Image (spheres, helix red, strand yellow):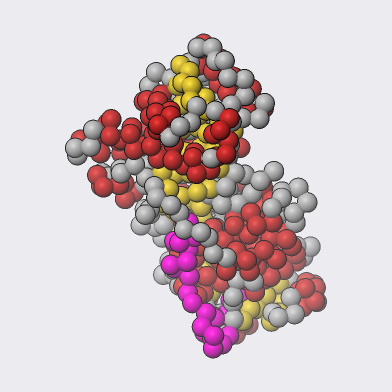
Amino acid sequence: MPVRVVSAEESAERDRAAIESGTPSRTLMQRAGIGAADEITRRFGARLNEGVLVFTGSGNNGGDGRVVAGRLARAGVSVKVVQAGEASDMVAPGVVVDALLGTGFRGIPRGAVQESIARVNELRKSGSTVASLDVPSGLNATTGEHSNCVVADVTLSFGGLKRGTLLARDCCGEIVVLDIGLDAAAPRSDEKLPLLIDRDWVAARLPVLKYDSHKGERKHLAIVGGGTGMGGAAVLAARAALRSGIGLLRAVVASDNTGAMLHATPAALVSAWPRDRAEIERDIGDWADAVVIGPGMGRSREAKDLLELVLSISRQPLVLDADALNLFENDVASLRDHLRGRESLITPHVAEFARLAGTDVKTVLAERFDIGSSLAASLGATVLLKGAPTVIFAPTGERLVSARGTAALGTGGSGDILAGIAGTLLAQTENAVTAASCTAWIHGRAAELCGYVRGTTLEDVLYALPRAWNEDEAPLESPVVARLPAVAR
């Protein structure tokens, strides 16, 4: 079932819609608490023998915690419920349940709640496993801001995935989304909420490569970039495309990089930057099914002229990345004119987005889940805003979120790999939203498969791509509708 990414206000609106449609708030609380208790039992069964301590606040989150306690107690688990500010005689229980503050919290925890948050974190350091209900207490469910919050081993999110938990993954541990029946009564506005991309979503949209598929059926991709001194960017994009199933690849790079490109990617055709319209039509316009332009292109006058010439001559589906976006700094109107009439995907990181849109990085980060919609509509192109998480904006207003990946991707060249994957999928699907969404998920999953952050290189990410494309995941057990792994360090 689809999982929506929600702010605190959107989460509350979904609850209100369910209540107004006839589901009592007590029923929602029961579903949340029972679902959380059963997930805790599945995960930490052996640790339950060491006892469970449930920290509760005065609000609905505290009510969820009391339902968890009752469910576990009826199953024979030794459970103690502690209201915020009360003393506890459990030294280091097997499991601590954090039910102090919920999605409505904003600001800085104070008084008894602050003391209880500190106690939960002390118990975790002493060996207890901590499960937070909905959000780690003290974390802003919309912005991810926190000055003093619980650090959880698992966060059990009810009815949707909270924006703040995606922006503060290091506080949340593994994130598990539990269905509590909100979708049946979801307001019509739910369709406009960002959708979480998962493996099933990706698998359902990837084109099948049949056993007898030839290179023409697997499509042709041209990658234009690799300016002087930056040939490595085009190499990474090319290798990613080849590891993503492209049938035939042409790398169009500056003349002093053609030799290096041939050596690094022997499976690719290699051409020097074209000198005239006829060469562009031959090597790109009449040949490729899609074009990636920008990796390592540079911002020289020569690069700008080439970019505009390629855009004016070719009409294929297009991925614009890196310098191809920087060359249109603060000039959305000109870029719109060049993209008109084709399926297009742009893949900026936050600084590139800010330069293109004429804003600042702070604003982009603060409005990450929303800011790309107007740009996508203005350009008539899909916008993939890279980061943690990655958000995809369709020209139609649809938004999707990929929350996979690690800080191993936070290094120069990571975006070039993403561009190569995206170009392959755009050539094969001819759908920029599908290509962007599948690319973001696969790119992130490949990084996760490397296992570590420090010590992992982009070569490791490239080598992990075949597994990311082909692995199977165990089906989820109801009421679980999504899982996100704890972030790697």
Of 205 and 478, the residue lying toward us: 478
On the image, the x and y values in percent for residue 113 come to: 50, 16
Query: Per the image, is 223 magenta?
Result: yes
Q: Main secondary structure of the magenta part?
A: loop
Magenta residue span: 198-227
Figure quadrant of residue 322: bottom right
Q: Residue at x 47, y 74 (%)?
A: 207
Figure quadrant of residue 259: bottom right
Q: Is residue 40 visible?
A: yes
Q: Residue at x 71, y 50 (%)?
A: 452
Question: How many numbered marks appear?
Answer: 0
Q: Left or right of 294: which side holds 116?
A: left
Of 321 and 162, the residue lying toward us: 162
Q: Is residue 44 above or below residue 424?
A: above
Q: Left or right of 410: which side holds 290?
A: left
On the image, the x and y values in percent for residue 127 come to: 66, 30
Of 279 and 292, the residue lying toward us: 292
Q: Residue at x 65, y 57 (%)?
A: 449
On the image, the x and y values in percent for residue 485 come to: 57, 47
Quarter occupied by the C terminus: top right
Query: Per the image, is 309 magenta?
Result: no
On the image, the x and y values in percent for residue 116 come to: 54, 18
Quarter occupied by the N terminus: bottom left
